[in-house]
Structures are given as C-alpha cells and as structure tokens.
Image: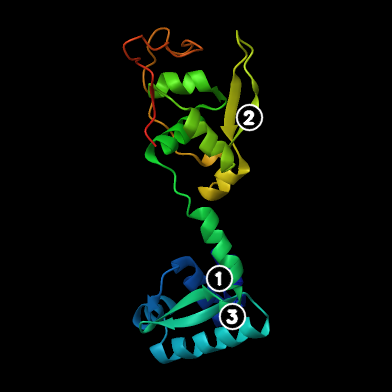
C-alpha cells in the first residue's frame, strides 16, 4: 500500500507538488518554509516557482504564482478580477449570531418547523429564516402532518458547500443530553405574548 502511494507521488512533477502546497496554504509562504516543506534548497524553490508560473500561463489557467514578502502565494490572475469581485459581494454577507444559531438548530434538528425552532431558541425567528432562505442556506421540505401543518425546514447543497461538508454526516456529533419528559414532542406553536410583554421575543439581528 505504501509502495503504491509512493509511486503515485513520484508521478507528480515537482511543479505540481509546489502548486498543491501553495493551494493548501492559501496565505503566502516564506521561501525558507517552502524549502523545508519541499525538502530542497531555496534556489530550487525559486526555479520551481518560475516554472510553475510559466506552466500556468501556458495552460491559460486563471491562477498564477505571485512573489509576496519574500515568499510565494497561489493567486488569481489580474484579468479575472472583475468576475472574482462578484464572488466577494456574495460571500461578504455575514450572518449575525442569532441567524447563525437558527441555522445551527436547523442543521442538527432537520427537518424542523418554525415553532420548534422558536421553542428551542426562546425568541421569534421570522427574520432569521427569511435571511437564510434568501441566501439559499435552507429550504422548505414540505409540511409536518400535525395541526396547522407547519412548514418543515432543512439545509441545502449551498449550506454544504459554504461549510466545506461533503454531506450532513460530516456534521460534528452533538453530546448526548438526557431528554426531559415531554421534551421531544414540544408544543407546535410558541407561547403567545402576554399583554404586558411576551416571553417570545424577537431575535436581535
């Protein structure tokens, strides 16, 4: 088994190995660090970086190797800036803490209804659900067969991509918590607020 892995690694060019290292690092890597990782002299890293840059250019790749602060980084080509900028406009929409909490509940408890989420959070979640639906992080999965037939929510493929998951099986395991009597099938609707101010508050976004 180890011999097969060694053979496959030997088939990779040194440029391909350097490309993989720079891609995995993300941030710029100092020349000395690259030399240690690649197990070679710094002068060889410089030549490999030049060779990789020429290879990417000749292949018409959208990536290139850039010298940064005495090291190297794999970056997008300047010609792609207009398109890549649109990506930042999409991914820059940060989720507030209450919205992230709502998303976490849906991810671990799906399929789950809005009243069930509100019961767990203790606040109303209309705005959080609207935001998550807008970002395509959750979707409607149908309706629960109970009185009122509330909508069931679950996560989407976009959620998996955003959090680097292959499937929902990759979610971390929750610790086992003893279930309280009557907790599993809680009320389908949150408590109505009292005239003087309700217990079901709106989340702060």
Q: Say which residue appears at 60% left-offset and 77% top-offset.
A: 79
Instruction: Check if mark 3's residue and mark 1's residue have beta carbons within 8 Å.
Output: no
Q: Secondary structure at mark 1?
A: helix
CA–CA distance in space, label 1 to label 2: 48 Å
Query: Comparing marks 3 and 2, which lies closer to the viewer?
Result: 2
Quadrant containing the N terminus in the rendered view: bottom right
The answer to whether residue 166 of the structure is visible from this angle is: no
**Residue 99, x across and y down, in percent:** 44, 36
Q: Residue 177 or 5: which is nearer the viewer?
A: 177
Q: Which mark is residue 13?
A: 3
User: In this rendering, is residue 6 above or below 127?
Assistant: below
Q: Say which residue appears at 42% left-offset and 92% top-offset.
A: 43
**Residue 135, x across and y down, in percent:** 56, 43
User: In this rendering, is residue 183 above or below 11?
Assistant: above
Residue highlighted by disc 1: 6
Quadrant for residue 167, please give it: top right
Residue highlighted by disc 2: 140
Instruction: Check if mark 1's residue and mark 2's residue have beta carbons within 8 Å.
Output: no
Disc 3: CA contacts within 10 A as few (<14), some (14-19) or many (>=20): few
Quadrant containing the C terminus in the rendered view: top left
């Amino acid at each position: 088994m180890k011999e097969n892995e060694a053979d496959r690694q030997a088939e990779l060019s040194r440029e391909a190995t350097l490309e993989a290292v720079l891609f995995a690092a993300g941030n710029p890597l100092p020349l000395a660090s690259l030399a240690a990782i690649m197990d070679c002299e710094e002068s060889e890293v410089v030549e490999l970086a030049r060779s990789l840059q020429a290879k990417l250019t000749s292949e018409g790749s959208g990536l290139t190797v850039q010298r940064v602060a005495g090291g190297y980084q794999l970056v997008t080509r300047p010609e792609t800036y207009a398109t890549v900028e649109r990506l930042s406009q999409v991914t820059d929409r940060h989720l507030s803490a209450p919205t992230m909490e709502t998303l976490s509940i849906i991810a671990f408890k799906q399929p789950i209804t809005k009243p069930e989420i509100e019961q767990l959070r203790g606040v109303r979640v209309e705005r959080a659900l609207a935001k998550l639906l807008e970002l395509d992080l959750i979707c409607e999965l149908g309706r629960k067969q109970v009185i009122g037939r509330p909508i069931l929510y679950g996560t989407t493929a976009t959620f998996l991509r955003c959090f680097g998951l292959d499937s929902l099986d990759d979610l971390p395991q929750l610790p086992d918590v003893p279930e309280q009597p009557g907790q599993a099938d809680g009320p389908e609707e949150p408590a109505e607020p009292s005239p003087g101010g309700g217990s079901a508050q709106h989340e702060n976004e």
